[in-house]
Image (cartoon, rainbow, N blue to C red):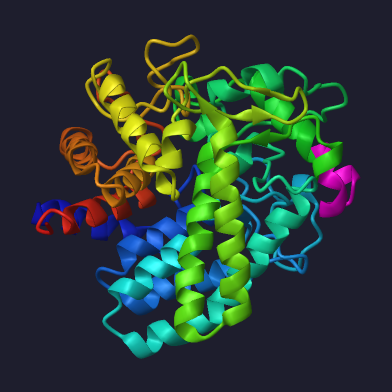
């Protein structure tokens, strides 16, 4: 195991550009939001100050309205599409104009709990919590205008699960007329069979052009987007961050933030119940435009285990992981292998992702479902030993897919291995 940790550390260092880390060279040459937060967890095992810097750098690019963008284009690189010219957000250091799963609150809490340099940790918590809370407020203000307790994503890239089967029906409503010609770069770095299709890219870009035409005004984007989805995994990450921020804010005396965050977490937890699907035995997405649950059993509804959900739901999700495990060789597939649309090597339509495994295992362990959490952890490490530090893996064959020497995969390996000796 020590050699795996060393290899993981080497990857984190190789992808470290000083104050931020690229997910992998070539395919993703900038700073990505949730990649950075999860990367910090791995960095903290060998350099706590560097781990804090990773999240601090991200938060330095928060917009005035509170939004934290999904990509920070720190320096030019023509090897990625869509670059700053397509987004046109007008920032001094260019950024994209959409967000990503709000895992920063969770990551900061985890760094704080583990910190050996407590003075530095308290200083960082005091600096970061107000910014993270401002982001959470932005979410509930701009992505929950009807005050339901849960927020919507307005672009598949926000979920991080770009081409999930979940989006097939709602995405068919997104037009492609008027999309300016473009040249994809991702397929030059990774196997096109592992990536989203051209038809999906046209819709991704149509949405970007729409939001740009609305001057990236977040008070207008939600209602004007033809794609508005309440994603259980996305919300679970936000709600877990709200709970974690509550604890931290209480601890450092940021009382107003603690009070707000407690309410966000409690209201969200109640609203999550509306996403439960008895037939699948898991949560599913809700389509705010069509006003219906999406009949698609993806990993998002299992990732809900990351939030504070009722014990019977955690137990059901643990059972669901076991059922999925019986349908493939490597847990947890990002889509049910027995369901329509499953594709074992195409990005989020089936492959295993270590970050998702980590968050599901963490939630199940907290809920007392330790056997299933251990199964996920052991499966994850076996996959790395077999196929190296890939971006994602085919759950049937275990083959590595997407980018190589992947930062957050490496970070999760260090995390999983650090848990092996713990009861
Ligand atoms: C990509 O470019 O593949 C990303 O997922 C968008 O953030």
Q: Which residues are magenta?
A: 209-221
Residue 21 showing in the rendered view: no
Residue 62 quadrant: bottom right
Residue 421 pos. (x, y %): 9, 58
Instruction: Looking at the picture, tell me which residue is in the foreground, 377 or 23.
Output: 377
In the image, is residue 348 above or below residue 112? above
Residue 271 quadrant: top right
Residue 377 pos. (x, y %): 21, 42
**Would you say residue 220 sits in the magenta stretch?**
yes
Judge left or right: residue 319 versus residue 103. Answer: left
Judge left or right: residue 411 versus residue 190. Answer: left
Judge left or right: residue 388 versus residue 44. Answer: left
Instruction: Looking at the picture, tell me which residue is in the foreground, 261 or 338.
Output: 261
Residue 211 quadrant: top right
Residue 269 pos. (x, y %): 54, 48
Residue appearing at x 40%, y 42% in the figure: 305
Residue appearing at x 75%, y 49% in the figure: 147
Judge left or right: residue 162 versus residue 350. Answer: right
**Would you say residue 284 sits in the magenta stretch?**
no
Residue appearing at x 39%, y 82% in the figure: 121
Residue 342 showing in the rendered view: yes
In the image, is residue 121 above or below residue 294? below
Instruction: Looking at the picture, tell me which residue is in the foreground, 52 or 321.
Output: 321
Q: Residue furthest bottom?
A: 119
Residue appearing at x 65%, y 23% in the figure: 200
Residue 19 pos. (x, y %): 48, 72
Q: Mostly what secondary structure, the magenta segment?
A: helix
């Amino acid at each position: 195991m020590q050699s795996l940790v060393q290899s993981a550390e080497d990857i984190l260092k190789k992808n470290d550009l000083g104050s931020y880390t690229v997910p992998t060279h070539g395919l993703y040459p900038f700073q990505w939001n949730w990649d950075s937060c999860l990367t910090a967890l791995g960095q903290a095992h060998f350099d706590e100050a560097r781990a804090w810097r990773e999240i601090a750098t991200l938060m330095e690019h928060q917009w005035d309205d509170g939004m934290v963008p999904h990509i920070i284009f720190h320096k030019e690189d023509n090897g990625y599409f869509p670059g700053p010219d397509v987004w046109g957000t007008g920032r001094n250091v260019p950024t994209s104009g959409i967000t990503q799963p709000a895992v920063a609150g969770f990551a900061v809490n985890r760094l704080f709990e583990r910190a050996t340099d407590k003075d530095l940790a308290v200083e960082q918590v005091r600096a970061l919590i107000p910014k993270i809370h401002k982001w959470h407020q932005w979410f509930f203000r701009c992505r929950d205008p009807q005050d339901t307790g849960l927020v919507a994503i307005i672009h598949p890239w926000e979920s991080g699960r770009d081409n999930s089967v979940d989006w097939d029906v709602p995405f068919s409503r997104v037009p492609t007329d008027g999309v300016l010609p473009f040249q994809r770069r991702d397929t030059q770095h990774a196997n096109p069979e592992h990536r989203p299709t051209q038809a999906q890219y046209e819709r991704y870009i149509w949405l970007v052009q729409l939001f740009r035409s609305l001057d990236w005004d977040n008070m207008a984007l939600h209602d004007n987007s033809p794609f508005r989805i309440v994603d259980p995994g996305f919300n679970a990450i936000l709600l877990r961050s709200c709970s974690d921020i509550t604890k931290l804010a209480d601890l450092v005396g940021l009382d107003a933030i603690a009070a707000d965050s407690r309410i966000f977490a409690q209201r969200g937890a109640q609203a999550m119940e509306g996403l439960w699907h008895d037939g699948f035995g898991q949560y599913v997405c809700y389509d705010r435009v069509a006003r219906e649950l999406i009949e698609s059993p993806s990993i998002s509804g299992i990732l809900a285990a990351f939030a504070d959900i009722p014990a019977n739901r955690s137990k059901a999700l643990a059972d669901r992981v076991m059922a999925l495990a019986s349908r493939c060789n490597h847990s947890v597939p990002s889509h049910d292998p027995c369901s329509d649309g499953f594709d074992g090597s195409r990005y989020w339509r089936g492959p295993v992702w270590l970050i998702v495994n980590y968050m599901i295992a963490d939630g199940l362990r907290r809920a007392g479902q330790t056997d299933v959490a251990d199964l996920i952890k052991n499966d994850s490490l076996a996959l790395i030993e077999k196929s190296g530090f890939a971006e994602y893996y085919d759950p049937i064959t275990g083959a590595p897919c997407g980018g190589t020497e992947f930062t957050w995969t490496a970070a999760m390996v260090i995390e999983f291995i650090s848990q092996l000796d713990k009861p």
